[in-house]
Image (cartoon, rainbow, N blue to C red):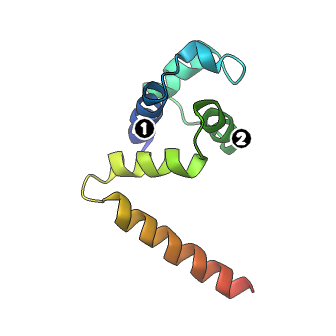
Amino acid sequence: MRQAFANALKTARKAHEKTQEDFSSVSSRTYMSTLERGKKSPTLDKLNALSQTIGITPLSLLTLAHLYFDKKSDLNSILDQVRMEVNHIREKVS
């Protein structure tokens, strides 16, 4: 999963025409390189900051990582599953 996240981060960054240097307010270029090579995993706070810098939600970045991780899955089935799971949790606590 770490490598899938690395691929997702790099892909999203490039798709939004961001350089590793564009993340300097969030992390060092060295840390970005480490993340994009799958050597480290971000904390939740860092995931949020990375996503904001790219201009997407953390869920979008994690969904893209899941698509890289599970090559058999497709976006619609993932979104349907997330919708079902979140609705189930919300119903249980309401």
* Residue matched to label 1: 8
* Residue matched to label 2: 45
Percent across and percent down for residue 47 are 62, 40
Q: CA distance from mark 2 to mark 1?
A: 17 Å
| Total numbered labels | 2
SS at mark 1 in the image: helix
Question: Which amino acid, by three-letter code, is at mark 1?
Answer: Ala
Q: Earlier in the sequence, mark 2 or mark 1?
A: 1
Q: Residue at x 39, y 34 (%)?
A: 7
Q: Nearer the viewer, residue 25 or 37?
A: 25
Q: Nearer the viewer, residue 69 or 87?
A: 87
The quadrant in which the C terminus is found is: bottom right
Q: Is residue 38 visible?
A: no
Density class for disc 2 (Cα within 10 Å; few <14, some 14-19, many ≥20) is few
Q: Nearer the viewer, mark 2 or mark 1?
A: 1
Height in image: 57 above or below 73? above
SS at mark 2 in the image: helix
Res 24 quadrant in image: top right
Percent across and percent down for residue 8 are 42, 37
Q: Residue at x 64, y 30 (%)?
A: 53
The quadrant in which the N terminus is found is: top left
Horizontal side, residue 58 vs residue 38: left or right: right
Q: Residue at x 64, y 15 (%)?
A: 28
Height in image: 54 above or below 61? above
Percent across and percent down for residue 76 are 36, 64
Q: Residue at x 67, y 80 (%)?
A: 90
Percent across and percent down for residue 73 are 30, 59
Height in image: 9 above or below 17? below
Q: Nearer the viewer, residue 76 or 73?
A: 76
